[in-house]
Amino acid sequence: PVLVVDFGAQYAQLIARRVREAHVYSELVPHSMSVEQMLEKDPQAIILSGGPASVYVDGAPTLDRAIFEAGVPVLGICYGFQVMAHELGGKVDKAALGEYGKTEAVIDQAKGILAGSPERQSVWMSHGVAVEEAPQGFEVLAHTAGAPVAAMQDPSRGLYGVQWHPEVVNTPMGQQLIETFLHQCAGLDKNWDASNIIADQVAKIRQQVGEHQVICGLSGGVDSAVAATLVHKAIGDQLTCVFVDHGLLRKGEADQVKHDFVAATGIKLITVDASEDFLQALKGVSEPEHKRKIIGEKFIRTFEKAQQQVIEEAGKTGKEVKFLVQGTLYPDVVESGGGDGAANIKSHHNVGGLPKDVKFQLIEPLRTLFKDEVRAIGSQMGLPDDIVWRQPFPGPGLGIRIIGDITKERLDLLREADAIAREELSTAGLDRDIWQCPVVLLANVHSVGVQGDERTYGSPIVLRPVSSEDAMTADWSRLPYDVLARISTRITNECRGINRVVLDVTSKPPATIEWE
Ligand code: XMP
């Protein structure tokens, strides 16, 4: 494998993903693993990730220099690059000029990991520490205003490093750098793709599950559909899917899951109508994190109740259901504060929203993957496009798209507005251009309008169309005005109580995609 050594939250999984994109198998390991243990894995190459620390500070995470002497090609990125420089005797110090964000790199020598680079390239930086002198034996390939050594290499020892982040999309030539390192410098073949990921996961699931019964919560979204299909491939009828209708779904969604998904996969499905139960629990609650926790907890309790039915239907009375499958993706984990040291932005219901005393062990086969990878896996397993290409919809559903407390009337109103927006976006052929378009009801905001010569005092609907690659960052979509106009006219005409439609023109960051 290629080992990606994790020096801190958020970066390392993204690097692993870029390695997969280069069709090479990778494994993530913590920086605290000993170098002997790393080498026991027989790595063909090693990539050191970025991280939040400063190498010259006492107690900063580091690596034994033996890692650089094992004859395995190593690429250091940002902090990992500084560790390499520091351990091998270069000069690393507080930068005279910190660089954060888009930075211009001057390429002094377009060779090795920078082969084929133009004289200047735009790179994404995030450093307050700089390598001032490269260690002996290294040649300097690039510099920036704040980094005298921004890229260096010693091909005779197979050592390479860059100060910038080649793994982020904001470094346009970043993927090329990673691929040059893997294929040219380390000589690795392209032999890893969606079908390997499937085979790998299927084997892991079989081993984890053994003879036990498994249930999977289906939400109607791509992630849980793909997770369920993977598990089904691994253990067949030991899996039962449970679809909880929590009353926070969009129009037509429940039917779609009950019919289309079952038709496409042949997986056993139990439907539980828990909408009354959820509504009751959410009554009067308007604080977003509180809503999320309630929904997360209710989901689990509903699954626990469904367990009895699963056992009976499986004809294995007495055997408990030991595992619960969830379609958690990597961005959900990071944003719920699950990455090492990451802040809790919001509790995704299937990660941070789970109660502490869950009786099931979790199976989360997509936990290290990103949405586009999940779609590729879904297609590879033969799931139809209308499941694989569905726009993301959060597990807590419309519950976190009503700003204010949740009532049946408000849900019905939002469901109508959402259906109109979705229909018009589809008709305009925009489904694959945008990542998703949350439709949000500002239930406690009222403004004055006029309709049919009458004064109205209604609530606004917010349209939140975004484009994104992985939901970690997003930009607002520049939708055609005539499409926006049609949506606005139809919503104000057809949804009684809505007298204004507004457009959210904020990127993520600073906003998140959902309003709650
Ligand atoms: P935010 O609002 O955090 O959303 O920018 C990022 C992506 O995640 C979806 N989302 C969720 N998905 N459970 C989910 O399964 C959740 O609790 C949840 N909250 C947000 C959101 O729709 C967007 O695609």
Image (spheres, rainbow, N blue to C red):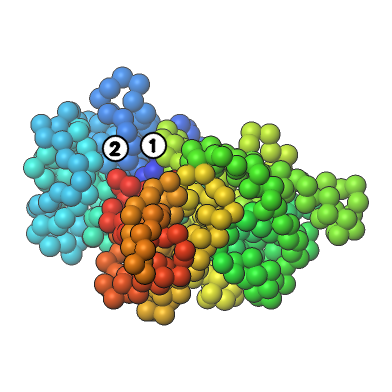
Hey, what amino acid is under mark 1? Gly
Distance of mark 2 from mark 1, alpha carbons? Answer: 9 Å
Is residue 312 placed above or below 146 in the rendered structure? Answer: below
Report the residue marked by disc 1: 8
Asked if the residue under mark 1 is in contact with the one under mark 2, i.e. CB atoms within 8 Å, the reply is yes
Residue neighbourhood size for the residue with mark 1, other residues' Cα within 10 Å, grouped as few (<14), some (14–19), many (≥20): many
Where's residue 234, x and y in %? Answer: 69, 62
Q: Is residue 100 visible?
A: yes
Residue 284, numbered circle: none
Hey, what amino acid is under mark 2? Tyr
Quarter-of-image position of residue 32: top left
Residue at image x 56%, y 39%? 284
Query: Which residue lies most toward the front here?
Result: 453
Report the residue marked by disc 2: 79
Horizontally, residue 53 falls left or right of residue 218, namely left
Decide which of 5, 85 is in the foreground and name it: 5
Horizontally, residue 26 falls left or right of residue 178, namely right
Where's residue 50, x and y in %? Answer: 32, 40
Residue at image x 78%, y 63%? 237
Where's residue 59, x and y in %? Answer: 35, 21
Q: Is residue 42 visible?
A: no
Where's residue 388, x and y in %? Answer: 53, 70
SS class of the residue under badge 2?
Answer: helix
Queried on whether the Cβ of the residue with tag 1 lies below 8 angstroms from ligand 1, the answer reads: no
